[in-house]
Image (tube, grey):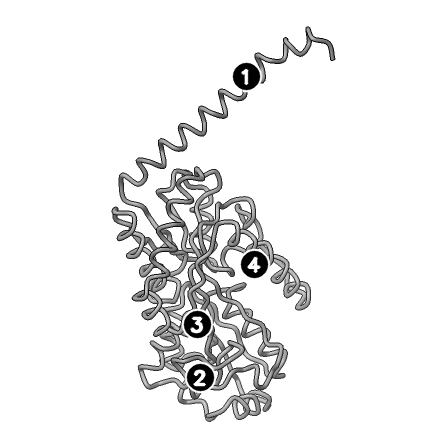
Amino acid sequence: MDIYNIDKGWPALAGAAALMLGVMTMQTAIAETFPDRPIRLILPFSAGGSTDTIGRIIAQGLSKELGVSVIPENRPGAGGTIGVSYVAHSKNDGYTLLMGTGASVVNAKYFYKGLSYNAETSFAPISTAALAPSVLLVNNSIPAHTLQEFIALGRKPGSNLSFSSTGIGSSQFLYGLVFEELSGIKALHVPYKGGGAAALDLVAGRVSFEIDTSLSALNSLQTGKVRALAVTSAQRIAVLPNVPSITETYKNFPTFGWYGVLAPVGTPEPIIHKVNAAMIKFLKSPETVKSMENLGLSLIPSSPQEFAQRIRDDDKHYGGIAAKYHLKPQ
């Protein structure tokens, strides 16, 4: 390239550099004033379930750390995909956030046709919040007091077992699917719009069993109308020390169930980092750790990059499960 052409290129390069500097300056200015009004945290399931409960705890923590109201808003339906889709298409200014789950954000594409979002390209991950082991609960009307007794009952002809979930593709649905295969039982799947309704029908005896998060399970156990037969974590959990791990019977039983906060893609990075810092500070406080552990949850604060990697890894994991069980979007 001759000197003349190099000289001709300088104005374009200088213009591009000025544009980039302008964008960076604008984003910094936005972050300095953010937030200056209430933030909505969309909960993609109905009130009363684990996502709702965890989301409200996170909203309170973010309100304290950010100095503005963070308002939880339930938008349930279609296994959480209605609320997730709403956030994916919201304005990317940091004032609409998502309390997402692995099932509703990542693996929904393997079960629902025509989704208008993609886990890896529609969101800006902020931080994971918690992992929730699940508990296999049965209604007290079921004549089984151990996992082995329940499996033996389910294998009998005419057992007529049923299990509840928050929809096709949810962690409860996947747990039920895997449990059916490993145990050899057959059960009718009964989907609900949220964990609260699913738990209520288990307590009322309208479904036989449920594999739900420890948080929801503890609430159901307090009614005295259900019993716990197993937990899905690799070890027994502190809040239910006498309940065996399902891995004591099925060594390779999988684990699902993270919760995290995401923003629409394109949200300025300074805003992402400000909300991330607020979440990490809140999640690492001794009070939060203790209260979450009492609910059977493990806190997993992360960087946006670590959260993005978890989403990529989960996509491969869920894709493998969908292929193994020949599951198709409906």
Is 281 situated above or below 245?
above
Q: Nearer the viewer, mark 4 or mark 2?
A: 4
Assign the C terminus to one quadrant of the image: bottom right
Q: CA distance from mark 4 to mark 3?
A: 18 Å
- Which residue carries the number 4 mark? 107
Q: Which residue is mark 2?
A: 138
Above or below residue 31? Residue 292 is below
Query: Gap between marks 2 and 1, in whole Å?
Result: 68 Å
The first of marks 2 and 1 along the sequence is: 1
Residue at the farthest right position: 1
- Mark 4 or mark 3: whose residue is earlier in sequence: 4
Instruction: Report the Cα–Cα distance between label 4 and label 2.
Output: 26 Å
Q: CA distance from mark 2 to mark 3?
A: 14 Å
Residue lying at 46% horizontally and 78% vertically, measured from the top left: 135
Helix, strand or loop at mark 2: strand
- CA gap, disc 1 and disc 3: 55 Å
Residue in the picture at 33% in, 66% down: 48
| Discs 1/4, front | 1
Foreground residue among 141 and 195: 195
Residue 127, position as x, y percentages in the image: 44, 53
Asked whether the residues under the numbered discs 4 and 2 touch, taking CB atoms below 8 Å apart as contact, a structural biologist would say: no
Check disc 4 and give the amino acid type: Asn
Q: In the rendered view, does 161 fall on the left or right side of 272?
A: right
Q: Quadrant of the N terminus?
A: top right
**Residue identifier under label 1:** 14
Percent x, y for residue 31?
36, 37
Residue at image mark 3: 213
What amino acid type should be assigned to the residue bearing mark 1?
Answer: Ala
